[in-house]
Image: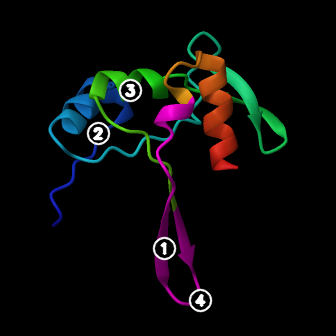
């Protein structure tokens, strides 16, 4: 209806990047565990969780901004609100993977 695209995890990241380059919005959830060799472990809600350290690379490869979005559903009103935060670009542009993982987790918290 709205012309969006969905990409399955099994398809890899390339279709997602292509869609973002074509002007589609990309919604990427970084708190995925692909195993210790592909993850950065950082504090997240008082625990130590795997976070994919790809946010900075996605920003550069896709030539896109990283804008945190937080959907909140009000069950009583049956209403969805999406909170849009300022872009994270300045705080992650020159950071290493661990710093980016920590910053992303801090933003989500």
Secondary structure of the residue carrying numbered label 2: loop
Q: Quadrant of residue 4?
A: bottom left
Is the image coloured rainbow, by chain, by secondary structure, or in one colour? rainbow
Residue located beneath label 1 in the image: 81
Marker disc for residue 90: none
Q: Is residue 18 magenta?
A: no
Q: Which residue is tagged 3?
A: 58
**Callout 3 secondary element:** helix
- Nearer to us of marks 1 and 2 is 1
Residues under labels 4 and 3: Cα distance?
37 Å
| 63 relative to 81, above or below | above
Residue drawn at 73 percent across, 27 percent down: 42
Give the residue at x 38% y 26%. 58
Q: Compute the Cα span from label 3 to label 2.
A: 15 Å
Residue 15: x %, y % from top left = 23, 30
Residue corresponding to mark 2: 7
Name the residue that disc number 4 marks: 76
- What is the CA distance from the residue labelled 4 to the residue labelled 2? 31 Å
Kindly identify the residue that appears in the image at 33 percent across and 26 percent down. Answer: 13
């Amino acid at each position: 209806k709205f012309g969006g695209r969905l990409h399955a995890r099994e398809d890899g990241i390339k279709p997602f990047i292509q869609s973002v380059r074509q002007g589609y919005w990309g919604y990427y959830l970084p708190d995925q565990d692909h195993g210790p060799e592909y993850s950065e472990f950082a504090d997240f809600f008082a625990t130590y969780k795997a976070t994919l350290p790809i946010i900075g690379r996605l920003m550069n490869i896709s030539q896109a901004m990283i804008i945190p979005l937080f959907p909140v559903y009000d069950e009583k009103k049956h209403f969805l609100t999406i909170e849009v935060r300022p872009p994270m670009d300045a705080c992650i542009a020159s950071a290493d993977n661990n710093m980016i993982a920590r910053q992303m987790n801090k933003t989500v918290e």
